[in-house]
Image: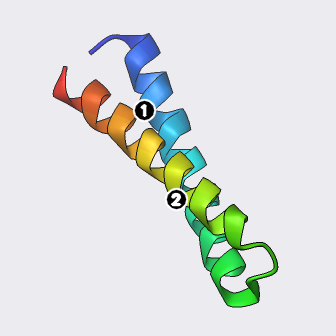
Amino acid sequence: MDKKAKKRIQTLNQRLQKLRAQFAGSKQQMDDPDELKNLEDEIAAAEAELAKLKGS
């Protein structure tokens, strides 16, 4: 794994942490139901990219 991939993995892990915190807060508040779906989609996309990077 090269430096660029390691940096991308690190960035994705940080982004996932922030997204999961936003998701938890949004779940409690429930102001905008579309926001939950958008956050779920972003989390899924980030996890898929992370899995792809770790697999290579």
The residue that disc 2 covers is 40
Question: Dividing the image into 4 quarters, which one contains the C terminus?
Answer: top left
Q: Of the residues under marks 1 and 2, which one precedes in the sequence?
A: 1
Residue at position x 38%, y 32% from top?
Answer: 49
Asked if residue 29 lies left or right of residue 24, the reply is: right
Instruction: Say if 54 sits above or below 13 in the image.
Output: above
Image quadrant in which you'd find residue 24: bottom right
Amino acid type at mark 1 = Ile
Q: In this orientation, which residue lies closer to the viewer: 51 or 3?
A: 51
Q: Which mark is residue 9?
A: 1
User: Dots 1 and 2: beta carbons under 8 Å?
Assistant: no
Q: Is 44 above or below relative to 8?
A: below
Q: Position of residue 13 (x, y in %)?
A: 48, 46
Callout 2: SS: helix
Residue 31 occupies quadrant = bottom right
Quarter the N terminus occupies:
top left
Tag 1 secondary structure: helix
Kindly identify the amino acid type of the residue bearing the numbered disc 2: Glu
Q: Mark 1 Cα within 10 Å, few/some/many (few <14, many 20+)?
A: some
The residue that appears at 70% across and 73% down in the rendered structure is 33
